[in-house]
Image (cartoon, rainbow, N blue to C red):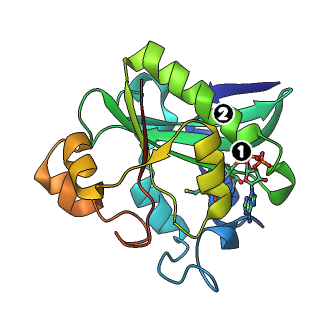
Amino acid sequence: MISLRYSTIGEKRKVYEWLCLSDTTPTFMGDPYFPDHPIPTWEEYLDDFEDFYFIEDEKEKGSVMIIENDGEEVGCVCHSSFHLKQECAELDIWMKSEACCGKGFGTTALKMLIEHLQVELRKTKFIIRPAERNIRAVKAYEKAGFRRVVNKEATHKEYYLSDDYLNKYGEGDYGSESTATMTIEI
Ligand SMILES: CC(C)(COP(=O)(O)OP(=O)(O)OC[C@H]1O[C@@H](n2cnc3c(N)ncnc32)[C@H](O)[C@@H]1OP(=O)(O)O)[C@@H](O)C(=O)NCCC(=O)NCCS
């Protein structure tokens, strides 16, 4: 049975290792398949994942939540909202290892996060942006209810809080051509 819980500051390093030093990492970052999205160093990760992601009281801005299966940690799911309009959240997810992938955990965790954010923070619009080449992620997100948008620019304008954020994050991690923009509205 899948459950989600807020992470703590003490779990920052573990979450980095699941993201950047796992056997899943080459499936979505770094050489040889994703040279356009290099693996962040520990210092770069610390710049991106500010403390608020690991402090439950600051969940309005964003959170990293730990996914557990029958009480055993299997990965994490993340929402960022500081750069988006009030009703919107951007999601991301990574399992801790290949052994935890392909079992439906990711799809279930995303559905749970969406429900949680709807209840806790009144979010109704969700965006997720994998690489087009990450077929497993695109498939899992479709199973969770996300659909690809046709007009990425219009969607970004609809979600982002300001032009500054749009200029900084609008391209996506893989560049506008190679990033799939997927959304759910509830
Ligand atoms: C992406 C991720 C979160 C998905 O979670 P998951 O628990 O593995 O996903 P699920 O098991 O729910 O679904 C995966 C689906 O992709 C399918 N799939 C996997 N590889 C595939 C491929 N090469 N081609 C087509 N479908 C594929 C699986 O068959 C499954 O679909 P099914 O249930 O209909 O058979 C997880 O695989 C992961 O952490 N990957 C590494 C990190 C990552 O890529 N994160 C996303 C960054 S945007």
Per the rendering, the mark at residue 75 is 1
Kind of residue at badge 2: Ala
60 and 10: which is toward the camera: 60
Q: Residues within 10 Å of mark 1 (few under 14, many from 20)?
A: many
Q: Which residue is drawn at the image coordinates 48% and 44% (left, top)?
A: 147
Mark 2 sits on what residue? 109
Percent of width and height locating residue 51: 44, 42
Image vertical order of residue 179 relative to residue 93, above or below: below
Percent of width and height locating residue 33: 62, 81
Q: Secondary structure at mark 1?
A: strand
Residue at the farthest top position: 119
Q: Are marks 1 and 2 in contact (CB under 8 Å)?
A: yes
Image vertical order of residue 180 relative to residue 107, above or below: below
Q: Is mark 2 within 8 Å of ligand 1?
A: yes
Count of numbered tags: 2
Q: Which residue is drawn at the image coordinates 51% and 65% (left, top)?
A: 131
Q: Which residue is drawn at the image coordinates 41% and 56% (left, top)?
A: 48
User: Left or right: 150 with respect to 113?
Assistant: left
Q: Secondary structure at mark 2?
A: helix
* Mark whose residue sits in front, 1 or 2: 2
Percent of width and height locating residue 93: 59, 47
Q: Is mark 1 within 8 Å of ligand 1?
A: yes
133 and 44: which is toward the camera: 133
